[in-house]
Image: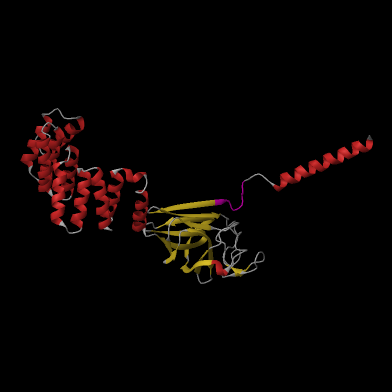
Amino acid sequence: MRQLHAIGVKMQLLLITFISSTVIAQPITTPRTPSPAASVVQTIGISTVTVKYSRPSVKGREIWGQLVPYGWNVQNFGNGNSAPWRAGANENTTIKFSHDAKVEGKPVPAGEYGLFFVINQDKTGELILSKDNRSWGSFFYELDHDLLRARIQLREIPLTEMLTYDFIDNTKNSSELVLNWEKKQFPVKIEFDVDNIVLANAAEELKGSTGFNWQGYASAANYTLQNKINYEQGLKWIDQAIAINNSFSTLSVKSNILRTMGKTDEADKILNDAIAIANEGELNIYGYQMLNAGQHDKAIEILTLNTKRFPKSANCFDSLGEAFATKGDKKNAILNFKKSLTMNPPANVKANSEKFLKQLGAL
């Protein structure tokens, strides 16, 4: 019996040891205090750039030439190759492009890449994008896996204690990714062909539920108009919108595209068709657009038409009063503002008419 008991105790100890080993081999996720993980995302147009990295701190150490050696350096682990700096700490720093991009003027296909830098003593540097994005640091760097290399010029900055990536100098088509650490800044210009990316994406979206309504086609056509690109495609899209909804909104977009293309006669005809079916609000908005464009007589023409179509609308006469006031026709401005006030206008319209009449010395 004693032997059986002893065997049982040994088995329990072995089982406890096994369970303990299993627990140690599969630890829980805990905070990583030194060099915590971070990420930064920038949208350019409808494209995104995502950088994932770890953030070491200076902690009073000499960084450049010491902690981060100058130039390329042979690694004491892994492949043992001469390698650039990991541009952070721990795992690979990675950069991901949602669409094809240009980095420092060089083409980069959409995808995720390992991000590395080299710093030289003369304040120059080098950017490296590697097809390897899952390695640990620079230990397994392979030269022939490089996708891109580009020379960069480093900048001096105020002290940045924790290594930080940021995006600055944003424009419609580009942004500058910067790595800031200690008193050095590593700049990288990133660009996207935004307009063509938007149009290609629109074509795909219009194959889905977005293409079931006129607004999708109209917004795509309006993008070509506002950004002065691919008017022929814009006309195709707005014709599809008109086929679903023949309205002032859709016809006016087509008219504007035709006018921009120099097809004035066609544009005028389409615009007249649009005005003929416009509602009160649409005519009012169009009148103000003409007014803001400095076309006072055209604005007065449109807003006068609105008062004739909707003679019971106080707002129509208030808007016409503004057009006359803007042109400097005090007499007709006062006449229309007073007309508006006799029609029991909404509070906002009443306030506007009274404000102008006071300015004109008629109240």
- The answer to whether residue 346 is seen in the rendering is yes
Residue sticking out furthest to the left: 331
Q: In the image, what residue occupies the spot 66% across and 44% down?
A: 28
In the rendered view, does 155 fall on the left or right side of 246? right
The percent coordinates of residue 237 (x first, y second) are 27, 51
Q: Does the magenta stretch include residue 33?
A: yes
Residue 311: image location, x then y, percent: 10, 33
Q: Is the magenta stretch mostly helix, strand or loop?
A: loop
Residue 159 locus on image (x, y percent): 51, 58
150 left or right of 255 in image: right
Q: Give the left or right position of residue 124, taking residue 237 as reference.
A: right
Q: Does the magenta stretch include residue 170?
A: no
Q: Name the foreground residue: 108 vs 242.
A: 242
Question: Is the N terminus in the top left, top right, bottom left or bottom right quadrant?
Answer: top right
Q: What stretch is highlighted in magenta?
A: 31-37
Name of the residue lying farthest toward the right: 2
Total numbered labels: 0
Quick check: 7 above or below 260? above
